[in-house]
Image (cartoon, rainbow, N blue to C red):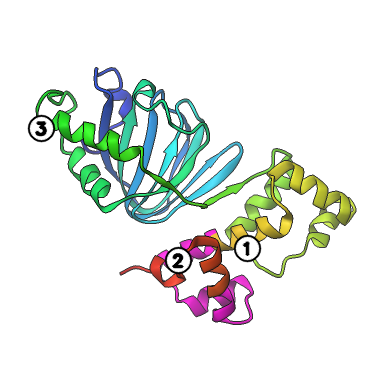
Amino acid sequence: MRNLVVDEVDNIDRAVLAIGTDYPPRHLLPVHQHRRAQLLYGATGIMRVETADGSWTVPPHRAVLIPPTTDHQVLMERVSTRSLYLEPSAVPWFPTRCQVVEVSPLLRELLLAAVDLPAEYDRHGRDGTLIELILHELRALTPLPFDLPLPPRAELRERCEAFQLAPNLREEPASWAAALRVSTRTFNRMFRTQTGLSFQRWRQRACVLHAIRLLSEGQTVTQVATALGYDTPAAFSAMFRKQTGTTPSSFRPG
């Protein structure tokens, strides 16, 4: 099924519904939720998913797991998606919080094939076997550290959201503390309480996720390192590899 809204087929008696959708550049899906669990895979482009407690950057050829009835919005950057909408009873292991995951070559091909199935596919024939194989492969998904927790406090969250759009390694907690009219010590304690991370770790995570977006758009490692405030491309690359387990160039378009 392609380019239709899941609500149009949600009542069909199938454990898995697969839908492919093409989105225009910079398309925003406003806050919404689904009754089913969702695996949202980007065959092209990059996505950013946001919920009340964080944001998730989804590079090309990766996916994000979105739990049932979770309010979320999605910013699409030249994205063609392949989504699975899953009956909660079919995926009892599903996470309770969004999670970006690696997608194996096999699962990628299965997702591409699944969107061409009819809504009421034959559960006992080849189509049903394909869906069963997808459900089997989903259990082996590898989580990726591409999430950025966001605080509930409105003033702090607003500053965090602005920072993640243009992060810089040289930003210091003292300037944030002054803007919030608290001491640096109080700010550091408040920030860790509300995000689960120290400001320094959160800042680095924001830089990594922004770097993935810039690299996916075709910017060079040198350009990205400079934009984030690193002294050298080598210093940036070392940090990036430590955080993601891979090189910055692996996220550049092929």
The vertical placement of 243 against 170, above or below, is above
Which element is circle 1 on?
A: loop
Closer mark to the observer between disc 1 and disc 2: 2
Do the residues under discs 1 and 2 have CB atoms within 8 angstroms? no
The residue nearer to you, when weighing 211 against 99, is 99
In the picture, measured across the screen, residue 123 lies left or right of residue 90, that is left
Disc 2: which residue? 246
Question: How far is disc 1 from disc 2 in space, using C-alphas?
Answer: 21 Å
Disc 3: which residue? 126
In which quadrant is the N terminus drawn?
Answer: top left
The magenta stretch is: 209-236
Q: Of helix, strand and loop, which mostly describes the magenta segment?
A: helix
The residue nearer to you, when weighing 4 against 206, is 206
The vertical placement of 167 against 98, above or below, is below
- Counting residues from the start of the chain, the first of labels 3 and 1 encountered is 3
Which element is circle 2 on?
A: loop
Residue 85 within the segment the image draws in magenta: no
Residue ID at (52%, 52%): 145
- Counting residues from the start of the chain, the first of labels 3 and 2 encountered is 3
Which element is circle 3 on?
A: helix
- Counting residues from the start of the chain, the first of labels 1 and 2 encountered is 1
Amino acid type at mark 1: Pro
In which quadrant is the C terminus drawn?
Answer: bottom left
Residue ID at (55%, 62%): 243
Amino acid type at mark 3: Arg
Disc 1: which residue? 167
Instruction: Please tell me the numbered disc located at residue 202.
Output: none
Q: x and y percent of residue 109 in the render?
A: 21, 48
Quarter-wise, where is residue 17 in the image? top left
Bin the neighbour count of mark 3 within 10 Å (Cα to Cα): few under 14, some 14-19, many 20 and up.
Answer: few
The residue nearer to you, when weighing 35 against 239, is 239
